[in-house]
Amino acid sequence: MTSLPGSFAQPHPGSPAGVALVRAPGPRLAEGLLTHMERRPVDVALAARQHAAYVSALRAAGWQVRTVAPDDDHPDAVFVEDALVVCGDLAVVGRSGAPERRGEAAAAEQAARDLGLRIERIKEPGTLDGGDVLQAGDTVYVGRGTRTNEEGICQLAHLLGGRRVVPVDIDGCLHLKSAMTALPDGTLIGVPEMLDTSVLPSVRVAPEPAGAHVVVLGPDHVLLSASAPRTAERLAADGLRVTAVDIGEFEALEGCVTCLSVLVR
């Protein structure tokens, strides 16, 4: 784990930024689903160490980490973001477009209940993965692709009440957040050729594909993959504090830094 200096001050001990839900990788991690990549060997022991470093980065940024119950029967369960969308005091339990992943949601729902969040669910025939949901200011962008369908987007929009929900067609990637995320000031950063940019404001082009995946840890603090060093340098030059973590074993399974946690602010 490396950090590049910027303008962000470390949070004071005892004043967490919020709660981060995570779930440890299971022994069947290497069997995870692949859609747009060719399979390569995955070192499960290395993945566990990378996950531990990721969790340490969250804690160092002031987040209180809570662990979702393990789910060794579901290889992709470590990508806990897909099971849950949290907006304020509401947790929406997803219904993945990949039937093999739907069993992951139960433990994530329980973790949300333990935090006292209100629970709603996406219902059949709707499908929705949390990795397709990007909250940026007052707007919620939702990727429309293989994992999230139109009905799922409509149900989410209804549950979110007055929030502006914008469907975004995606192409050549698994989730919306595989192609686009948002910086602390709401600026979108990503890979425009994978997105229907006609429904978006301007998108800052990430120097590397992995630079499209940014987790906002604080007002001027972001987390991204060590595989995006040019993006890290540019964001640091803009005055952001950048923490980079190696998640290479998860990237081999189409995962990214956003997939590995649910941040409850």
Image (cartoon, rainbow, N blue to C red):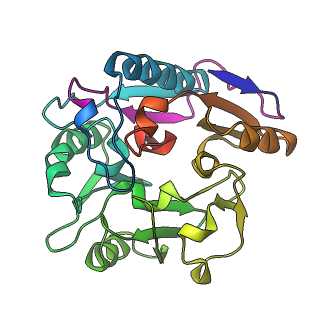
Magenta stretch, main secondary structure class: loop
- Which residue lies most toward the bottom here? 198
Residue 66 drawn at (x, y percent): 36, 27
Rendered location of residue 86, percent (x, y): 39, 52
Judging depth in this view, the residue of 121 and 48 nearest the camera is 48
Magenta-span inclusion, residue 21: yes
Vertical placement of residue 8 versus 109, above or below: above
Question: Viewed as shown, does residue 121 lie left or right of 236?
Answer: left
Residue positioned 62% across, 68% down in the render: 192
**Closer to the camera in the image, 58 or 169:** 169
What is the x, y in percent for residue 156? 33, 70
Please give the name of the residue rendered at 85% of the width and 41% of the height, measured from the top-left corner: 239
Question: Which stretch is magenta?
Answer: 6-29
Instruction: Determine if the magenta segment contains residue 243.
Output: no
| Quadrant position of residue 96 | bottom left
Quadrant assignment, res 180: bottom right
Quarter the N terminus occupies: top right
Q: Position of residue 263 (x, y in %)?
A: 46, 42
Asked whether the viewer can see residue 212, the reply is yes
12 with respect to 9 (left or right): left
Instruction: Return the residue nearer the eye: 15 or 165.
Output: 165
